[in-house]
Amino acid sequence: MAIRVMVADDNAHFSRLLQRGIEGEPDMEWAGAVEDGRSALAFLPVWQPDVLVLDLVMPHLDGFGVLEQLRRDGDGATGKIKVVVVSAFGQEDLIERAMGLGAHYYCMKPMEMGILLQRIREAVRRPDPVPRRVRDPRLEEHVARMMSDLGVPAHYKGYLYLREAIMQVSEQPELLSRVTKGLYPNVARRFGTTADKVERAIRHAIEATWTRGNLPRLNEIFTYAVDMRTGKPTNSSFIARMADEVSLAARNGRGLGA
């Protein structure tokens, strides 16, 4: 059965692009688009999508309001709808809040259409909770190449922590809902350190990358993932963006093989 997809986003151009992408996939079906949260809640029970692609910043009712209502609905008509959040904002508190309210994935705009279509499929097909899987032995090498291309300094302690965090999120995207209480402690246990030291070391590595890394490549990947207050992406947005790149490469048979 085809996956029915609905979008709630006040950017009509984005919705049209997604519609064309959905209509080109044999296993997907376009349900419709709305431009605000109130309309999303009104049309969800009418269109009955399997997946809602949801922006966070919309008029009348924002994406968080929609997520909160879906959570309250629980086992009702709309409570089982899978939600993929798309947003140009990558602050850690926003990502954690959205995932904590039940979003299945959080994608940073702009993103490759292939990544978004993959996330839509995974939202429907991935069992909950996610079973732990054996790590692809080529994953670490591929992530290392990506980080080298960006100019992440390999001699920094945060390099190892960052590489591990990217791999863990590429395998278990739900960790983005628990960066502070889940992801950092996981990485800390892997290296025999503390979550606070992991967070600081990753931040230091990202700051160093922005100072003397491959700026053209960084700007290409993180154009809309930069925190306006610091001029750099947050730890969460950097990790999320890199994990998306890993997923796209794996899907297309690049880097990880096919």
Image: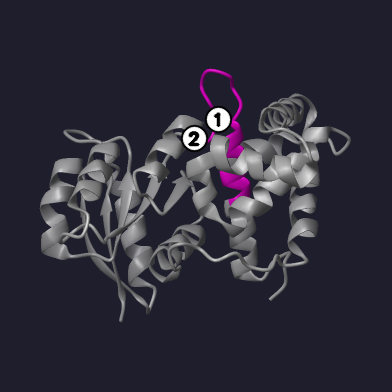
Please tell me which residue is depicted at 59% across the width and 51% down the height of the picture. Answer: 169
Q: Look at mark 1 in the image and give the residue it sits on.
A: 226
Is there any visible trace of residue 91 in the rendered image? no
How many marks do you count on the picture?
Answer: 2
Question: Which quarter of the figure has residue 121?
Answer: bottom left
Check residue 90 in the rendering and tell me which mark sits there, or answer none: 2
Please say if 160 is above or below 138.
above
Asked whether 54 or 79 is in front, the reply is: 79
**Residue 211 vs residue 168: left or right?**
right
Asked whether 203 or 14 is in front, the reply is: 203
Which residue type does callout 2 highlight?
A: Gly
Please say if 120 is above or below 65.
below
Residue 234 is inside the magenta segment: yes
Residue 151: percent from left, percent from top: 79, 38
State which mark lies toward you, 2 or 1.
2
Is there any visible trace of residue 157 in the rendered image? yes
Residue 128: percent from left, percent from top: 43, 64
Residue stretch in magenta: 225-243
Packing grade of label 1 (10 A; few <14, some 14-19, many >=20) is some
The residue most toward the top is: 229
Which numbered disc flags the more N-terminal residue, 2 or 1?
2
Residue 87 is inside the magenta segment: no
